[in-house]
């Protein structure tokens, strides 16, 4: 396990401070706001810590306010329902007395049923592709703190990088991702790592057709809501193809979809995110 991944695992090891209340810390980084994937992952972990049986099968979340990276986040869990097959939890992330994030998560005991899936796209193997850090080496000085910062999720993009600011690109992005090291055999932890990683590049697909980037002065972008469905067991420390597209952007909002396939072609996770795409 790399130091960066070990730090992320520690970040997800929430401190229980009261029944159904947990505290999560933030990394000591120069950020204007807390990374959304971190809040989603910590919220899912808080929910899972109150569940005795079943693994996560879905989450539906709203980003309400920017998180303050200088103070801890409190996670309050509401035990909505404990059933024989399904367990439901609601989590509110709080800072400065106000909700910054709201999540509903459902957990399911595995059982037999119907089975089918979309086939995995035909793409190059991850071992044949350069890592994101290697491809961004020429921009080391421009990226500054981001480049120097350790990254717990390894990314290998297929084709052009999404932040190259070339307008007219189809709103489609494919990359391989995995945790940078070996993780314990805990399905909840693997689901939380996937939730963390899912918010790293999904929004970029909305920007692909447009000559615009996050740091443009006349653009404001932010995640609004995020939904995930975990279809079966998977390992976040093994290569997974992240296949994303953006069907539409309109009225100051954009929509992106993502699918995570393991290297055997199994569809493990599906997700949808809506983001703020405001022109100032």
Image (cartoon, rainbow, N blue to C red):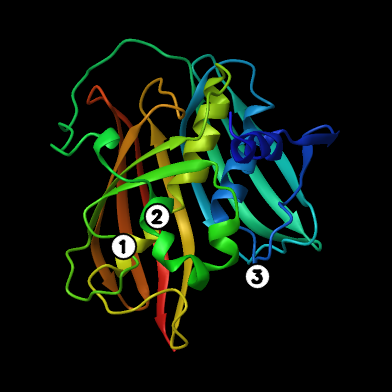
Mark 1 in CB contact with mark 2 (< 8 angstroms): yes
Identify the residue under disc 1.
162
Alpha carbons under labels 1 and 3: distance apart: 22 Å
Q: Nearer the viewer, residue 15 or 8?
A: 8
User: How far apart in space, not on screen, are marks 2 and 3 (Cα)?
Assistant: 18 Å
Q: Within 10 angstroms of label 2, few (less than 14), some, or many (20 or more) residues?
A: some
Q: Is residue 178 above or below residue 249?
A: above
Q: Quadrant of residue 205?
A: bottom left
Q: Secondary structure at mark 3?
A: loop
Q: Which mark is residue 201?
A: 2
- For image coordinates 42% across by 59% down, the residue present is 137
Of 123 and 85, the residue lying toward us: 123
**Callout 1 secondary element:** loop
Residue beneath the point at 67% across and 39% down: 7
In front of the other: 20 or 172: 172
Q: What residue lies at 80% left-to-right and 58% top-to-bottom?
A: 71
Comparing labels 1 and 3, the label whose residue is closer to the camera: 1
């Amino acid at each position: 396990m790399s130091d960066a991944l070990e730090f992320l695992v520690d970040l997800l090891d929430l401190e229980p401070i009261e029944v159904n209340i947990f505290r999560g810390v933030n990394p000591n980084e120069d950020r204007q706001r807390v990374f959304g994937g971190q809040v989603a992952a910590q919220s899912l972990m808080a929910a899972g810590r109150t569940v005795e049986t079943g693994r996560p099968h879905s989450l539906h979340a709203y980003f309400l306010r920017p998180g303050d990276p200088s103070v801890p986040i409190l996670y309050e869990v509401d035990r909505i329902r404990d059933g024989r097959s399904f367990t439901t939890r609601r989590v509110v992330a709080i800072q400065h007395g106000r909700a910054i994030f709201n999540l509903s998560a459902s957990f399911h005991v595995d059982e037999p049923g119907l089975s089918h899936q979309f086939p995995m796209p035909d793409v190059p193997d991850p071992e044949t592709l350069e890592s994101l850090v290697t491809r961004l080496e020429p921009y080391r000085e421009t990226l500054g703190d981001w480049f120097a910062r350790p990254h717990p999720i390894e990314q290998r993009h297929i084709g052009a990088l999404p932040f190259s600011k070339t307008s007219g690109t189809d709103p489609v992005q494919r990359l391989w991702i995995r945790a940078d090291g070996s993780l314990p055999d805990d399905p909840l932890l693997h689901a939380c790592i996937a939730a963390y990683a899912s918010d790293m590049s999904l929004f970029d697909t909305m920007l692909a057709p447009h000559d615009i980037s996050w740091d443009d002065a006349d653009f404001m972008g932010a995640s609004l809501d995020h939904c995930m469905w975990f279809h079966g067991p998977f390992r976040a420390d093994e290569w997974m193809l992240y296949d994303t597209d953006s069907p539409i952007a309109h009225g100051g909002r954009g929509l992106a979809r993502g699918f995570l396939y393991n290297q055997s072609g199994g569809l493990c996770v599906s997700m949808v995110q809506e983001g703020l795409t405001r022109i100032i």
